[in-house]
Image: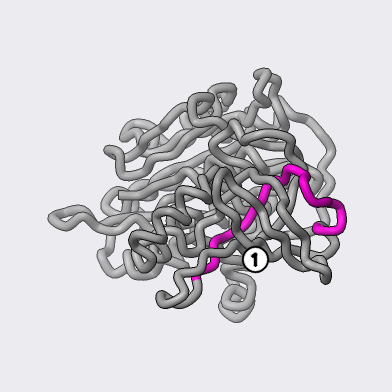
Amino acid sequence: MKTRTKLVGLLFALFVMMFSLGAGYASNTPKLNIDKRPVYAKCSVADVVREANKDYKGTSQKYKDKDIIDYGIISSIAKNKKSIIVKFSDREVSVSAMKSEVGFFSKGDGVAVYGQFAFGSEKKKEVTIEADHLGTATNELSSDYYIYGGDKSYVDKNSVSVSLADNRIKFNILKSWAETEVATDEAYQKIFNSEIYRRKLGKFYYVNRADGEPQPELFGVFYFDYNVFLEQDGDKKKTHDIEKAIISNICPKELTKLSDPITWKIIYPTETSTSSKGVKFDHYVGVYDNYRVEFAFTPVNSMGNDDGGGLCVIIYMYYNDSTNPNHALYTLNSLTLS
């Protein structure tokens, strides 16, 4: 695959110098698999039930497979402890859940239900919830998004909307994140790639905590524009080859493994996932120096004319398996393409 503009290795010199920590990883399981670590949107279950009473088919299509969370009061618990009846505002809904979690609750307890709606036949017009988790709660939920575990919740007003490539890619980051220009190995330049920087196709951030203190994590998004970086139109159809070239360019140690066509087909993508907004990702975990580098790729379709489309590339860099990816997951889940 030829490239019109050399994709400069995104050698994270600034990152490595700032966070000189010892690496500790043993797994190549992607932390950004949003299917395994859903971002649950606050939802009024009572409103959905009312909506379903008016338009059952439309409501079921609207909320199918959506990861939602709401607060309610437990009205009753099944004898087998595999389901509970929860009163959400003025509507009671049956919630199926893990017996091990139901056992922690009693009738009258407040509960945060993380899960998805289940819709029966149009004739019965039944709305239930299949819970992934039950969480303790004492009052109504105040945040817009929640991630189970780690007590992480997010409010949209505490985030900043970012757009790239003439608004073709949009996502939210926390206000505490600090933008950085990733250095290359060429005299520690302030740009990670002249074309991506000049055309405003990418952003990189230090993933800071809410109080602004830095964490040993780096998150980046950039648009790999086929018209800019590919010489031959035929290359545009070789999406996985392009992804392989990007991975090996950023993580040169991966090249040997990725060069074997049989191995490549077996290990790539490591996993796939789909966000609540319907964006589908291919995932891969590589190594740069003593750091894990996660990649998530999703295609950006052509808009016609001379626009050949491209790839949205997400890079998440951290040093240890114990890293909590919740901030990065919130941003990944917010990503939209047009």
The question of residue 16 being in magenta is answered with no
Quadrant (top left, top right, bottom left, bottom right) of the N terminus: bottom left
The question of residue 112 being in magenta is answered with yes
Seen in the image, is 154 located left or right of residue 277?
A: right
Amino acid on which disc 1 is placed: Thr
**Residue depicted at 41% across the width and 32% down the height:** 162
Pointer 1 residue: 256
Q: In the image, is residue 207 above or below residue 117? A: above
Q: In the image, is residue 151 above or below residue 253? A: above
Residue 243 location (% of width, % of height): 48, 60
Disc 1 secondary structure class: helix
Range of residues picked out in magenta: 102-119
Residue 255 seen in this snapshot: no
**Residue depicted at 39% across the width and 55% down the height:** 51
> For this rendering, which residue is in front, 50 or 60?
50
Quarter of the image for residue 100 reads bottom right
Seen in the image, is 163 located left or right of residue 288?
A: left
